[in-house]
Image: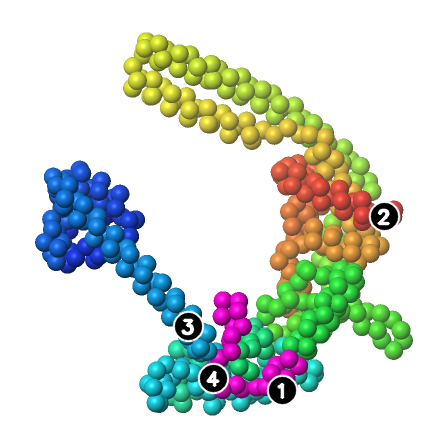
Amino acid sequence: MLDLAITCKGKVAIVCNCVDRLQRNYDATPTLENLRKLGKIEVHFINENLVITKDSRATDLTFWNMHVLMANFQVNHQTEKVKDSQKKLWEEGHWLGLAPIGYLNGKDEDTKKATLIIDEQRAPIIKILFEEYATGLHSLQSLWYKSRELGLTSKEKNHFEESKNFNKRTFVSRNKIEDILKNPFYYGIMRVKGNLLPHIYGPIISKALFDKVQEVLQSKSRDVFSHQQEYKAIQFAFRGLIKCDCGCTITPEHKIKKNGKRYVYLKCSHLHENCNQGLVNENTLFEQLDNELFSKIQIPARVFEALKKNVLNNLEEEAIMNANLKRNLQTELQILVNKEDNLTDLYVSGKIKEDIYNRQINAIAKERTFLEESIAKYKEITKDIKATVDNLLDIVGNLSDIMHNASPNKQNKLLKLLIKDCTLHGKKLKYTVRAPFDKFIKCDSPTQWFKHTTQDLETYAKIADEVKMVKQQVLVSC
């Protein structure tokens, strides 16, 4: 409404039944007062028989402010009463809001007041879940599957229609199962604003059962943490690299056969029931990558040294050319800066008019921006970039040997440098080769590398640190 009043060309009349229909606090007062003083609005309050305009007398303005004050007091007083009422109800054991799953919001038959009643369909299932988990034989994942078998569905609106349409049932999530197991409401205690208060509704489980479940949860948490720490200490080449076609993570694990040989297999976590991905031997993927990637990124010894020399010569030539271009651009930029300073002196001394000054300053600013952007394009070819290209060629030239002789941890670092967007489909790995290695793969002959190795210097600069690190940790004598 006020935005409309501000944009209207003429005066706007605001008609209110009473003052508190317009204001219950002072947030809008500065805007209203400013519009009133400018003559943009006049406010009509019917109950108070009051009209506020640009020319209102002091008594009318004071009367208006007093009513705003009373409205503000009433709102604050009402808020305080609501908070006191909530606190009293909580202390008496009443739950306010949507009932936890296992209970339903209803009305007391005698008092007709809002209350909670036990959900005859879901409460027995929740009790079974507590009892099952207390045995210690379940994980949260397996208990979630159990809840689906038992038919534990959400009770929120639009999720479940009683007996009308069974197909619209929505099973509760795995996270909801964990919330249920940790909720003391089911044995008679409700959690309110961080405090635990007894409630007046019938319990679904005993406190002893709840405490047993908490012990199992804590022990499972410790076991999971220990397992995760132990798992993190194990080195795997494909850890953190591959997703399943179903969207789940592919995780590696060791398998020891009867003959004592140790193998690494990759498996899907199978969070989606329709996933049929089986176990895949890690060596199968290495064979695929060796054929499709490692063997293609190899430089014959007779080409290797010539290639490196050619690349570094090209970098030197480009460095000289870029330095000359950059120097010329910087000279032009300095001329513009001097011109801008002189123009400002003329304007301050009153020798040129403001419109001429603004026009010329804007033209200089545009030209200056263009020059600064051009200078940024001509980056210096530093020793670091030369070393990066040198390191990169060393790795590329010996990639297959490096990969076969490296430890799993070093293989993992190199694979992350080489490929991305990896998904497993059956026993086939789909992936994208990272830049600049993708350029080497596309070359039909190593002699074509001469024109590719100096094209994307920014890419070389970005991976400089990674290449140096990988070379130090991975490169072995061949």
User: Residue 476 shows which numbered tag?
Assistant: 2
Q: Nearer the viewer, mark 2 or mark 3?
A: 3
Which amino acid does the dot numbered 4 rest on?
A: Tyr
Q: What is the CA distance from the residue labelled 2 to the residue labelled 1?
A: 57 Å
Q: What is the CA distance from the residue labelled 3 to the residue labelled 1?
A: 34 Å
Q: Which residue is mark 3?
A: 88
The answer to whether one can see residue 217 in this image is: yes
Residue located at (22% from left, 40% from top): 34
Mark 1 vs mark 4: which is more N-terminal? 1
Q: Nearer the viewer, mark 4 or mark 3?
A: 3
Q: Which residue is mark 1?
A: 131
Say whether marks 1 and 4 touch (CB < 8 Å): no
Q: For the image shown, how many numbered marks are present on the structure?
A: 4
Q: Circle 3 — which element?
A: helix
Mark 4 vs mark 3: which is more N-terminal? 3
Q: Give 172 or 391, whichever is nearer the viewer.
A: 172
Say whether marks 2 and 3 touch (CB < 8 Å): no
Residue 289: percent from left, percent from top? 73, 59
Say whether marks 2 and 1 touch (CB < 8 Å): no
Tell me: residue 151, above or below residue 259: below
Q: Circle 4 — which element?
A: loop
Residue 405: percent from left, percent from top? 84, 54
Residue 435: percent from left, percent from top? 64, 47
Which amino acid does the dot numbered 3 rest on?
A: Lys
In the image, taking residue 82 as reference, residue 247 lies left or right, namely right
Res. 78 image quadrant: bottom left
User: Residue 102 shows which numbered tag?
Assistant: none
